[in-house]
Image: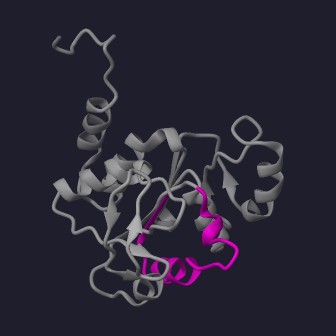
Amino acid sequence: MLLYPGCIFFEIALAAELLASLGSVLRYYTPDGKPHLASMGACILPQGSYADLARDTGGLAAVLVPGGDPGSIIPQRLATPCLRSAAERGVLLAGICAGNLVLASAGLLRGRRGTHNYTREHASPEAVAFTAPFWEGLVFERADLVTDEGARLTTAQPWAYVSYAAAVARGLGLLNEAEAQAFRAGHQKSYADPDIDR
């Protein structure tokens, strides 16, 4: 889990819960390795810095990148070395919301299929114009979630956190397609659903 000042932990929280329940060991990394005050108020003690993550060879299987305001890491390209290192090793990269912008800023979406919410219907004209250069080369799909299996890359819209969690677990081989569908269905019930016990 790649954390940064201004990130929104909620977007990756369900994925973290699911992966932990399936036996994954979760590790958190911050730009400088210092504790992270998460958006929900918890203090997360990271395993190390982004530089440590770039050197990690201990069974790293995926890097999840939450959204929020990545302005604290994009201008200096702080996450670029660790993300590129992970991509070169075939690690699954999964961005959600502005996490996709972090991946794009590292050059990892060029020539790849993906989605993002920096479009006219979801962002201000200023945000659309400012981020446009980052999306050059992306094969954009207007979808809640896109998995480019050849690149081991998942991108998701901020509201698709349930599908995101299932896609990450599926991409890691922790759930099969039927189990991923059941997980999504189980987290998307509503009070209007007659199958819910009242």
| Residue 120 visible from this viewpoint | yes
Q: Looking at this view, is 37 or 59 the one in front?
A: 37
| Magenta stretch bounds | 69-95
Residue 52, quarter of the rendered image: bottom left
**50 vs 40, nearest the viewer:** 40
Q: Is residue 90 magenta?
A: yes
196 to 125, vertically: above or below: above
Question: Can you give x and y, in whole percent of width and height, for residue 133 in the image?
Answer: 80, 63
- Residue 25, compared with residue 13, is above or below; it is below
Relative to 56, is 41 above or below?
above
Picture coordinates of residue 161 (x, y %)? 42, 44
> Is residue 1 visible in this depiction of the protein?
no
Q: Looking at the picture, how far across and down is residue 151, in whole percent?
A: 51, 67
Query: Which quarter of the image is occupied by the N terminus?
Result: bottom left
The residue at the point 25 percent across, 9 percent down is 194
Residue at 31% across, 23% down: 189
Question: Residue, x 41% and y 59% (percent of image)?
Answer: 38
> Image quadrant for the C terminus?
top left
Q: How is the image coloured?
A: one colour
The quarter holding residue 168 reads: bottom left
Image height of 78 relative to 103, above or below: below
- Tell me what residue is drawn at x 30 percent, y 56 percent: 16
Does residue 58 appear left or right of residue 197 in this picture? right
Q: Is residue 27 magenta?
A: no
Residue at the extreme bottom:
55
Q: Nearer the viewer, residue 87 or 48?
A: 48
